[in-house]
Image (tube, grey):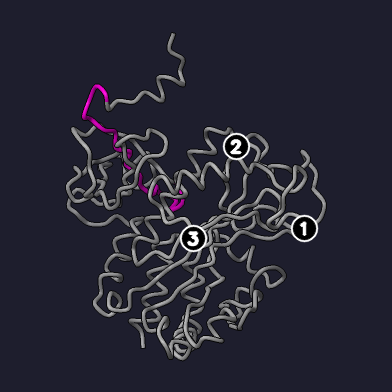
Amino acid sequence: MASLTDLVNLDLSDTSDKIIAEYIWVGGSGMDLRSKARTLTGPANDPSKLPKWNYDGSSTGQAPGEDSEVILHPQAIFKDPFRRGNHILVMCDTYTPAGEPIPTNKRHNAAKIFSHPAVKAEVPWFGIEQEYTLLQKDLKWPIGWPIGGYPGPQGPYYCGIGADKAFARDVVDAHYKACIYAGINISGINGEVMPGQWEFQVGPSVGISAGDEIWVARYILERITEIAGIVVSFDPKPIQGDWNGAGAHTNYSTKSMREPGGYEIIKKAIEKLGKRHKEHIAAYGEGNERRLTGRHETADINTFKWGVADRGASIRVGRDTEKEGMGYFEDRRPASNMDPYVVTSMIAETTLLIN
């Protein structure tokens, strides 16, 4: 007799060419992911050939009830680790029926910046370190923490092992493998400084694909935590007090930075970032002021400074980059809940399009 698991895992390829496409988009808060599925007549690998679709924007805080239709434009395809086979995940962005990007569609402007000839010529690479916190579902308290209480102080948890130091590793590992299966360029994972907090890294990814990959990796993580009965939080400071916040450090390089003499280009780029510090901070995630206090893993929110191997700086340059005279730098300011389309395109715009 078939069990529910048997039916969920049914391989459709024996009986049908049809595939299931899960269309994913960013909802009205700018952080909530939404998705719904449709049947396609056969395998697909080109987003431009997928049908556009629509949804009720009044139910996601993205359109008024009297004119609620929002149109989904498929932009990137990934393999579906949940349904497997030829089934796909489709990252979409959002438009009015007249074809105008709606205000929460941050991908549209990012794509314009990344398609600018001066940006394209520099082949911008991004590596994003996405921190997150796993919470107990009903209490919204970190996994591994005593109910209503606190664990021992920070120190043993970062990259820690053992039942008293690493919590929900099965969820984290499931996410890691699912991202590789999906075709996301996930480059690593590690336990973070606060117990119950983890990090995954995506990259190096070129241009707009960094944003697509982070959003789909977040989607996969939310789906896995749904199965596990726990909650993932991207809040930049989930627990007040002497606990680390959660960021999305963004590593960046251009073709010129990766070639001999690149260190001088890096210094000029950092100088440009300093001049637009306030604009960047305003776009780097809600609630970031609770994280960027200067007491933990980065500089105070009102201070811009950079340094070599300095984890207390806004921008950190690696020792290898300094030694080799070329490489990349790390922007430590973005919060864990930042929009990767906004952050990556803004870094590219400031360093490549603004004098």
Q: Secondary structure at mark 3?
A: loop
Q: Is residue 259 magenta?
A: no
**Residue 130 horizontal/vertical position (percent):** 53, 58
Q: Which label's residue is closer to the chain start, 1 or 3?
A: 1
**Residue 26 horizontal/vertical position (percent):** 39, 49
Vertical relation: 63 (above or below) 292? above
Relative to the observer, which residue lies in front, 110 or 123?
123
Residue farthest to the right? 152
* Magenta span: 14-32
Q: Which label's residue is closer to the chain start, 2 or 1?
A: 1
Relative to the observer, which residue lies in front, 191 or 71?
191
Label 1 sits on residue: 154
Please identify, in this view, whether the residue under mark 2 or under mark 3 is nearer the observer: 2
Label 2 sits on residue: 230
Callout 2 amino acid: Ile
Q: Is residue 28 magenta?
A: yes
Vertical relation: 136 (above or below) 354? above
Q: What number of labels is visible? A: 3
Question: Label 1 to label 3, Cα distance in Å?
Answer: 25 Å
Image point 68% across, 42% down: which residue?
Answer: 143
